[in-house]
Image (tube, rainbow, N blue to C red):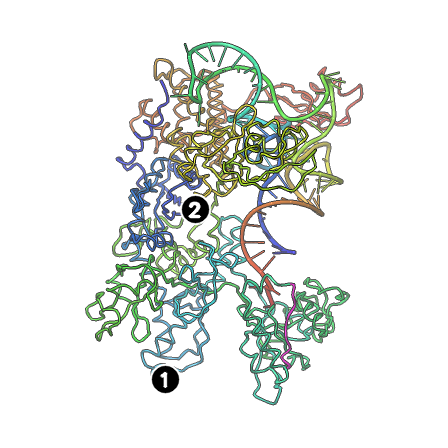
Amino acid sequence: MQYQFNEIEKKWQKYWEENKTYAAKDNSVKPKYYVLDMFPYPSGAGLHVGHPLGYIASDIFARYKRLQGYNVLHPMGYDSFGLPAEQYAIQTGQHPAVTTKVNIEGGVDKQGNVIPGYRNQLDKIGFSFDWDREVRTSDPNYYKWTQWIFKQLFNSWYNKTTDKAEKIDTLIEQFKTNGNANVNAVCADVAHFSAGEWNSWSEEEQQQLLMNYRITFLSDTWVNWCPALGTVLANDEIKDGVSERGGHPVEQKLMRQWSMRITAYAERLLSGLEGLDWSESIKDIQRNWIGKSVGASVRFTISPPSGESEGAIEVFTTRPDTIFGVSFMVLAPEHPLVNEITTPEQKAEVEAYQKAASLKSERDRQSDIKNITGANTGAFAIHPFTGDKVQIWIGDYVLASYGTGAVMAVPCGDQRDWDFATHFGIEIKNIFKDKGISEGAYAEKDAIITNSDFLNDLPAKEAIKKAITEIEKRGIGKGKTQYRLRDAVFSRQRYWGEPFPVYYKNEVPYLIPSECLPIELPEVEKYLPTEDGKPPLGNAKNWHWDEKNKKIVSVPVGQKPPSGVWGLELNTMPGWAGSSWYFLRYMDPTNDNEFVAKEKVNYWQNVDLYIGGAEHATGHLLYARFWTKFLHDLGYIPFDEPFKKMINQGMIQGNSAFVNYVSEWGTDEGGIPIELEPIELPELLAISSNKLKKILDFQEKYDNYPDLIKILKKYNPTKNFDDKKLNIKIKEISHHIPINLINVGNELDKEKFIAWRKNWAGKEDVHFICEDDGAFIVDREVEKMSKSKYNVQTPDELVEKFGADTLRCYEMFLGPLEQHKPWDTQGITGVHGFLKKLWRLFHDDNGFNVSDETPSNEELKSLHKTIKKVKEDIERFSFNTPVSAFMICVNELTALKCNKREILEPLLIVLAPYAPHIAEELWAKLGNTESITYAVFPKHNDAYLVESNHKYPVSFNGKMRFMLELPADMSKEAIEKEVLANEQSQKYLEGKTPKKVIVIPQKIVNVVV
RNA sequence: GCGGGUGUGGUGAAAUUGGUAGACACGCUAGACUUAGGAUCUAGUGCUUCACGGCAUGGGGGUUCGAGUCCCUUCACCCGCACCA
């Protein structure tokens, strides 16, 4: 009886769906366990084999936990707002909601392409998702709550004293009674004001002031503007100076935008990492991104060049201990004080430098670090301790965006300052005892400070503390901690995102009442910006708010709205809005009154295991932590970290195939290469990989290639090709071809290839130069899997051919989950064979046949060894090794011809997380009427694992020489005696007495001669 | 430059606390069976040597009776950050 995987899998997938086998209960006597996958963006291209890798691992873990008696929450949904659907909408006019739905549920797109649909593809793999909890971020019932959370952020400020976010009302209360004198908040620069002043201000003025405190706030900021995408981008959406999506150039632009005051959480986001079971590399990336540095801010007063008003330059330094080494100061060219302080003599030079710097992009400035440039302002600052006058320079190695945009330059301790000083001939003071600085700065923090007044003879680390104390005492500055993390821009000038629940009265934003949410995306005719450059929502007819009647109303474009009617926000939220809290919504996906009910979030708590890509380190994973902490501060959720443990699955790379073509050819005489004389070949000449190599290496003469000669003669009739000494010299090009045109031996199916090319290029003009055996071999190369490289392997094809259980086991068998690995289908037959072998344990020629006989010790040992290993491996998230363990077990049981229920039944439970369909089928055939999902994972019994004998490897001087089987309970002394008495030992002892004999019972014997 | 990771047969890999390196698969070789459609079974397969043996976990050194595993050093590749004061 054959293993009919297609039938079996369909049957059980249907059963699970109908019986809601994987529905999680919102309360249970069982302990809870929350296993989450990073939800996908449903693209039209569908899933390739790389996507389910993490889902399979998490599914195995979820199923394993159910067998261990846990109430498991294992949901899936879609991050369905995003750029591709919108770009497609711009091209085709198709509403993004429609394409998104098709991409998820399957269908046909506007160009007639059949879209399989994410859901259908996922279902075929047999995941144990609780689909009743599905969320889509673009669903108004979902983004209603994203908007609600935005409102909470708007209505909150960060109180540094309590170190958490609080309702804005508590702040307003303080303003009313005390002004802002005692307010200790994370905020923009705000001048002091009294309660009286506050109370005297107009509503509009008060609102504007509050904007400086709100956790989400509106401000004119320099943003990364991407003209090609027509939107601003967050820092984490830019890689190497271009947009992460599409690789378009990005420029700086001053725009009024919503931002998130994530900087308020910098310290907590940093320290919170300590308790997380995440990979060190992700934690490091986040630490780096937050970029904490501890030091001091110090004010240097400006010595007025012409007796004008006195100003000060504030600098930040991590090395206040080196303050006596300061011999000049450097400002960023954009620093606001530059124009003020520059002396008339230096003005021309400084302005020229400023101009040159402004023309360079941020990227150029960063890449051109070797070139030392700068200009002297002619102004001086007063050293706060020595009273010396120090020159003030400008230089583009100082960044306007970091710290205060100014540095105190200590050339002896900082290489960049040293380079600058050396280049411009500025004095270099040495304040380090016994450290030479003639060749470069001494940047280590281990020197003894000297020539530094009250810091003399202190080691650097102590001097730092002393210097800060002294700086604070003299009132010239204070200890300060600086973060590299910037507030996150939250507006996008796009259509396909969450609308803000915001309308504007005289440019002042007001929130839509919560009972009116969600504010749904309006219909627009075009998804492009308006003619006057407003975001696409500017095209919407119905996009005004009637304050009195609390509803969206229509105001014709260009007309002034009637009184009480105001324009709604035209920006939408960025992609990370919906994904920052989705893990909470799964707990209570249909709740219409709250984003999540308290008792549900109290039960489910945070995610126990999160599996997903490492590429979201500074985006999603940071923002989700931020929102979680915020919601925790306001008392909505009981925890302040979203994901306790995370595993980042490696990328599955594609294995591209290439056909080589000869594009040019020439000859060389007698092995001496000559210049190619390119002749265009009207016929496409494809050449097999190995042949090509031989020709390129001049290993074979052209006369071995009659086909080639024929063509050469055809286009070069005057040349004599009969001279056997002539070699062919060719120039080759290669093109990607679909991987389904080749077999496992990298051999091209020529007919299929011609048909594909005809379809693609409309030509049938390929001529093949094959290997001697007639095969045409293609080149292979590992690359990223993508449609354009024709190297995409979909899970659907493999499920069709081998079944979901095989695919699941094989993807795990490939290697450790975290590792990147190229996709290669060659090994899949081995895993498929294992499942067939398992099937045969339960069947003979006449059908299902399992006996109730008592198993032998050997059979029990094989089973219990497997139970133990699989349990241990899954628990340490080693998903590849259990597959081997299953194979070993099935191989052993096959050799023992074991078909005993007592062995096979527990084995099925152990296997069920990996191969749930075949396990269910055989489980049912054994007479069970309930799904195997909630069976009890068997416990291994050590009694079956102990051996009466142990085969000792006997080593001489550490080299293993022979095996010796001895009773397992034999004493060390007896073992030593046995080993030395053994005749094989005599050979290695060569008559000498051993110096030492090491016996480790149950392990090894080593004789030292 | 800084931080993190990876390096083991022809290939994917295993070796959890230092104890038989290469389990389990793929591929390959030979054979059996079947008149073949990617079926099944048996044997072999790290390199080297006729053999005894020798050599092998990127390279070099060390600790140890014993090192893929621990320490030092060095190389290669991948990822992240990068004038961050």
x 46%, y 75%: residue:
A189
Vertical placement of A115 versus A348: above or below? above
Where residue A233 appears, x then y in whole percent?
Answer: 43, 61
Q: Are marks 1 and 2 on the same chain?
A: yes
* Marks 1 and 2, how far apart at CA: 52 Å
Where residue A841 appears, x then y in whole percent?
Answer: 41, 19
Of residue A774 and residue A87, the one placed in the foreground of this image is A774
Of residue A23 and residue A28, the one placed in the foreground of this image is A23
> Is there any visible trace of residue A133 in the rendered image?
no
Number of other residues with Cα within 10 Å of mark 1, as a class: few under 14, some 14 to 19, many 20 or more: few
Judged from this view, the residue extending furthest toward the bottom is: A307
**Residue identifier under label 1:** A196
Q: Say the numbered circle drawn on residue A947.
A: none
Q: Is residue A826 left or right of residue A98?
A: right
What's under tag 2, amino acid-wise?
Tyr
Vertical placement of A993 versus A315: above or below? above
Of residue B61 and residue A331, the one placed in the foreground of this image is A331
Where residue A857 appears, x then y in whole percent?
Answer: 48, 18
Q: Report which quarter residue A954 is drawn in.
A: top right
**Residue identifier under label 2:** A610
**Residue A640 lies in magenta, yes or no?**
no
